[in-house]
Amino acid sequence: MHKSIAFAALIALALGAIILAPRAGARAQDRPEEGPIGIEKCQTISRPGSYKLVNNLTFTGPAGGTCLPIAADFVTIDLAGFTISGRISIFPRTTAIAAGDNTTGIAVRNGSISIFDVGVDLGGNGSIVEGLRLAHCTELGIAAEGIVKGNAVVAITGPGPFTGVGISATGTVTGNSARGTRFIGLQIGPGSTVIGNTVTDGSDGYGIFVDCPANVTDNTAVNNSSINLRLDGTGCNNTNNVAP
């Protein structure tokens, strides 16, 4: 082959590689990332990851059952504005979403839960519960250790005296509201930061009950039948709370 022809062929091959390379790169960039795993029905969550409801869920299981039991660490469940509704059995109790004491890093957010004995019960630590609306649970609205933020809990009626807690939490508890709980609107563990919550119209107990020490600031607790704000023990910072 003539040297000039061979050289031209090499140039053509090099140009082709340059032209093709960006296109391949563009295809790799355009490839969609894997999104959250869709949840269409009540089921056990047994692997870490991000999950998202794709429709409303109705729990029809037995007494003592749970719609979404979590059996793994680092699970995020986005209700995506949908509702989980169920049934009330009192004993054994039904639960919408639950994780055991041996789990960690569970997050639940953005949706509604109604008609359970217990709404959200996260037994491990490092949890996040935010942006939920809970109504008509008999025993407990939310239980978590970590961050509990921006939730609204209504009508936790309790099956009897000294039962019915809106939110039971240890950690950072901020921007929540509880209305019409039978026994305690917010039940707070020691070492917590409790800021900007509102508890009203509790029928048979405390508005906010805090185990000291804790930072309790800018909360409002009014029209609760027994005590609006109870700081139990010593070492609580009680600042700018409205709790006559």
Image (cartoon, rainbow, N blue to C red):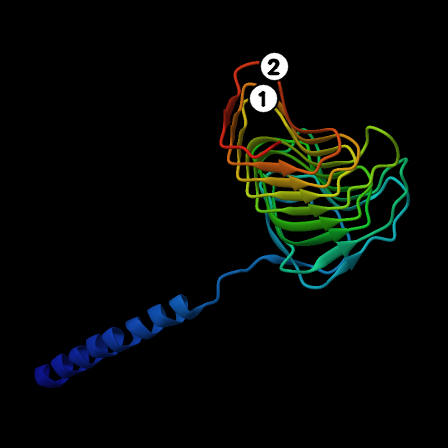
User: Disc 1 on helix, strand or loop?
Assistant: loop
* Residue at figure coordinates x 34%, y 68% from the top left: 25
Residue type at mark 1? Answer: Pro
Residue at the far front in the pictured view? 244
As measured in the structure, the alpha-carbon distance from the residue carrying label 1 to the one carrying label 2 is 10 Å
Q: Position of residue 194 (x, y in %)?
A: 54, 32
Judge from the rendering whether residue 185 lies leftward or rightward of residue 60; answer left or right.
left
* Residue at figure coordinates x 74%, y 38% from the top left: 202
Q: Residues within 10 Å of mark 1 (few under 14, many from 20)?
A: some
Q: Position of residue 128 (x, y in %)?
A: 57, 41
Residue type at mark 2? Answer: Gly
Query: Residue 211, located in which quarter of the rendered image?
Result: top right
Name the image quarter holding the N terminus.
bottom left
Q: Which residue is mark 2?
A: 233
Of the numbered discs in the image, which one, if any, rests on residue 10? none
User: Disc 2 on helix, strand or loop?
Assistant: loop
Query: Residue 30, located in which quarter of the rendered image?
Result: bottom left
* Residue at figure coordinates x 77%, y 51% from the top left: 114
Q: Which residue is mark 1?
A: 190
Asked if labels 2 and 1 touch by Cβ distance under 8 angstroms, the answer is yes
